[in-house]
Image (tube, rainbow, N blue to C red):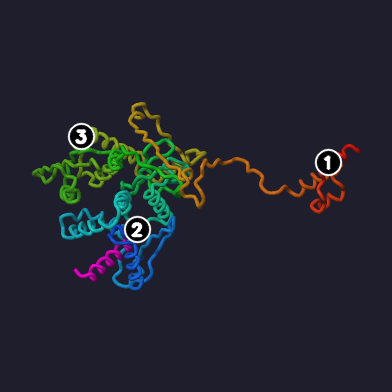
Amino acid sequence: MSEFEVVLERQWKLLSVLTTSQEGMTLQELSRLFGVSEKTIKRDLITLKKVFGPWKSKNEAHGRKRYRYESQNLTFDEFLDHNELFVLYLGLKLTDALTGTNLGAKAASARQKIEKTIREERIKFADCIAPLCRHWGKFTPKICEVVDAVCLAMEKRFLLRVSYRSIRSEADKTYEICPYRFFYRDKSVYLVGLCCYDRKIKFWKLERMSSAEVLDKQRFKIPENFDPDSYVMNGVESVGTPTIRFTGFAARTVPEEHAGRILDIKREKSGAIIVKMDFEKFPTFYNFFNLIMYYGANAEILDPPDLRLKFIERAEEMRARYYASGRNPIDYYARLDASSPEPENYFEVERDEEESPEELEKETVYPLEIEDLTLLGIKRGRGRPRKYPKIEGLPKRKRGRPRKEEALARRQALSEMGLITPGQESDPRRQKSTSGAELSVKGKKK
């Protein structure tokens, strides 16, 4: 390989590095990466500047600079910057259903190429926010602001202050949380994180957050013994592996729509099927109840007995409600509303029952490790780091010269004592100052 080809290859790789780097790279880092001197890197940067235009530079401490290229500045085939590659990688994580097909192989190949370009921390961050992509439809503008704040706090490990209103609450409440990751459940996106008040892992529904604020002066650490994936699955109300009998149209559609959940299937001569299904990772009993209600009389739970009794109780509650309202439910509820007294408060808050000691022992209290960046001196504008923590509420000490009224009162008091002449009151700066001997003589005369 000729010397010209070596220089051209190095400059091409240098352009690729400066384009895909998020924070940019210094001359020392580039010289160490390519195995050449800093002067050689400077000459290559000047050559790239003549061809592709000026680069972006960022000044740091001790006169050090970081160089990078924006994809919009290139005059030929555009490169994707670091954030665009990250978004594409995030979208490719949702192509697992295509595994085994030609498109699935192409998606896996593209994902492997992007993994070599972006950092490992960004790959872990993509795993945390991937459930956002499963949400069907667009978020409202207010929720979009909340999503941006949560993603920023999750990536930089900053504390987050959210205003949240649960179903049982009458007004918004403020929480300071350590956001760990998102997860998708019941066609909604939830945030799992550590509550700073009681140091317990909790879930917050994204649509119920009215505002979110990033506390960029406090950074948290995730405990080493905490596994978000296992905790999310433990927090789900598992249905188990029930055995269900399907008849009619359900016997034809269930093997098609729920093929991934079927563990065992047995076909009867009448056309019905008895299926053992895996609902270990199914969201809650309410979703399972809705699934059975969708098939109506064509679905019957055979095993386990506890799940069957629970479903019977729920069906009996529905049956009793329909029998109570009768054939004219509109008139029935109109008469019921007319005879009922006027409530004092329309928002009835349901209080949680007291938890038993056994349930309290099961809850794990995780340690809360927070770095106060204000105390450490980071995130301050300029100057030396603060040696002592800032204490709020202390009175400010007086600064500068005394006020004019205080100076006049002082001179008037001195004139009454005879220590200064009346002419000195107007402008004491033009008069000669009285010495100690003169003051003692004046005091003896009096």
Callout 2: helix, strand or loop?
Answer: helix
Residue 288: x and y, percent?
A: 26, 42
The reply, left or right, for residue 391 in relation to residue 159 is right
Say which label, 1 or 3, has the lower sequence index: 3
Give the Cα separation between the discs numbered 1 and 3: 110 Å
Name the quadrant containing residue 12.
Answer: bottom left
Report if the CB atoms under discs 1 and 2 are less than 8 Å apart: no
Q: Amino acid at mark 2?
A: Gln
Identity of the residue drawn at 23% across and 45% down: 296
Q: Is residue 30 left or right of residue 332?
A: left
Specify which label sits upstream in the sequence, 1 or 2.
Answer: 2
Counting other residues with Cα less than 10 Å from the Cα at mark 1, is it few (<14), some (14-19), or many (20 or more)? few
Q: Secondary structure at mark 3?
A: loop
Extreme residue in the front direction: 437
Q: Which residues are magenta?
A: 1-23
User: What is the C-alpha distance between the residues marked 1 and 2?
Assistant: 73 Å
Nearer to us: label 2 or label 3: 2
Instruction: Give the residue at mark 1.
Output: 437
Instruction: Please state which amino acid type lies under the numbered disc 1.
Output: Ala
- Nearest to the eye among marks 1 and 2: give it: 1
- Which quarter of the rendering shows the N terminus? bottom left
Sequence order check, earlier mark of 2 and 3: 2
Question: Are the two marked residues, 2 and 3, in contact with CB atoms closer than 8 angstroms?
Answer: no
Pinpoint residue 368: horizontal percent, then vertical percent: 40, 37
Residue 305 image-quadrant placement: top left
Q: Is residue 285 visible?
A: no
Residue identifier under label 2: 28
Q: Residue furthest top?
A: 357
